[in-house]
Image (cartoon, helix red, strand yellow):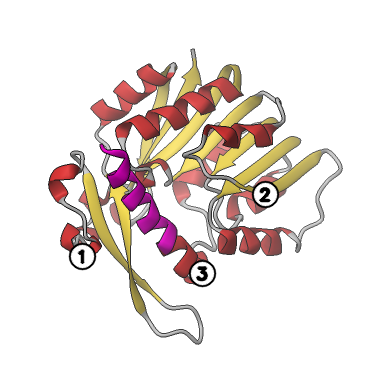
């Protein structure tokens, strides 16, 4: 994918989350069933990174679960980060758990500097990678995650499987609405609309870029970034099939 096209797609999503951050946060007050299963089966004490932390609901669950160590949530949406800090302020943190939120642009290799050289036990990326345009850009992010992990460290992620929802499929829009030539895109690249209004706001339509991953594509990404795929399951939404969760281990 050309850099110019990737930039257009990133700007499209950036505009969405800046414009609809407050409304979007209202739809994410609870974690998904798949994330709750991750907390129960895979998460553990140690140093963890949450890429695309949104409004901080996972951080709250981290506190409730009684994990020890540190949790760093990063996001590129200031409205969502503000919401995350407000949500966390309602809880008293135990002395053996440090939680903080930071702004980060994952397109830049410099985002890893916010780790201050600390190697991670695990990194999580729920419903985020499918919003990163361009195969090379996604691979570069995963390579940065890989080098930020301890040997054998875990990378846990989920990807939207919207092809399993007739409702979501009906929200696919032509790329002409975003002023983008579809011939410049990669297989799986999709434009979806989103409709919601926060209290006191009129309903408006937002547009988001989403990449639909195949398992073969994820297997290739994992290998190229230096991971082994250890486990996976499907969860969330009607029929419990809208989210594909995978656990990767650093080779």
The residue that disc 3 covers is 26
**Label of residue 101 in the image:** 2
Q: In the picture, residue 244 is in which quadrant?
A: top left
Q: Residue at x 76, y 61 (%)?
A: 89
172 relative to 239 in the view: left or right: left
> Which badge, 1 or 2, comes first in the chain's sequence?
2
| Residue at the far front in the pictured view | 4
**SS type, badge 2:** strand
Q: Residue at x 53, y 44 (%)?
A: 105
Q: Report the magenta residues as a range.
A: 1-15
Residue 14 painted magenta: yes
239 relative to 103 in the view: left or right: left
Question: How far from the left and from the top, in percent, is residue 152?
Answer: 56, 16
**SS type, badge 3:** helix
- For the question of whether residue 148 can be seen, the reply is yes
Tell me the distance, in whole angstroms, between the alpha carbons under discs 1 and 3: 26 Å
Tell me the distance, in whole angstroms, between the alpha carbons under discs 1 and 2: 34 Å
> Which badge, 2 or 3, comes first in the chain's sequence?
3
Which is more foreground, mark 1 or mark 2? Answer: 1
> Which badge, 1 or 3, comes first in the chain's sequence?
3
Task: State yes or no: discs 2 and 3 in contact (Cβ < 8 Å).
Answer: no
- For the question of whether residue 174 can be seen, the reply is no
Question: How far from the left and from the top, in percent, is residue 235?
Answer: 37, 45
- Could you tell me what secondary structure mostly forms the magenta stretch? helix
The residue that disc 1 covers is 177
- Tag 2: Cα neighbours inside 10 Å, few (<14), some, or many (≥20)? many
Considering only vertical position in the picture, is 218 above or below 73? above
Question: How far from the left and from the top, in percent, is residue 83?
Answer: 62, 64
Which is more foreground, mark 2 or mark 3? Answer: 2
Considering only vertical position in the picture, is 11 above or below 159? below
Task: State yes or no: discs 1 and 3 in contact (Cβ < 8 Å).
Answer: no
**SS type, badge 1:** helix
């Amino acid at each position: 994918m050309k850099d110019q096209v990737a930039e257009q797609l990133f700007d499209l999503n950036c505009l969405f989350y800046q414009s609809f951050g407050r409304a979007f946060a209202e739809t994410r007050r609870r974690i998904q069933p798949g994330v709750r299963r991750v907390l129960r089966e895979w998460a553990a004490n140690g140093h963890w990174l949450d890429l695309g932390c949104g409004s901080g609901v996972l951080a709250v669950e981290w506190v409730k679960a009684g994990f020890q160590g540190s949790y760093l949530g990063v996001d590129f949406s200031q409205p969502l980060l503000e919401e995350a800090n407000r949500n966390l302020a309602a809880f008293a943190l135990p002395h053996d758990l440090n939680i903080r939120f930071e702004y980060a642009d994952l397109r830049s290799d410099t985002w890893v500097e916010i780790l201050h050289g600390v190697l991670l036990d695990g990194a999580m990326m729920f419903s985020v990678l499918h919003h990163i345009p361009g195969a090379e850009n996604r691979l570069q992010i995963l390579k940065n995650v890989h080098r930020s992990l301890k040997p054998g460290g875990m990378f846990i992620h989920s990807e939207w499987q919207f092809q399993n929802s007739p409702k979501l499929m009906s929200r696919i829009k032509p790329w002409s609405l975003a002023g983008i030539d579809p011939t410049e895109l990669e297989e799986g690249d999709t434009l979806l609309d989103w409709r919601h209004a926060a209290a006191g706001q009129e309903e408006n339509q937002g547009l988001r870029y989403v990449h639909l991953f195949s398992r073969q594509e994820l297997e290739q990404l994992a290998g190229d970034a230096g991971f082994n795929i250890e486990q996976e399951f499907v969860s969330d939404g009607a029929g419990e099939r809208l989210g594909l969760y995978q656990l990767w281990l650093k080779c």
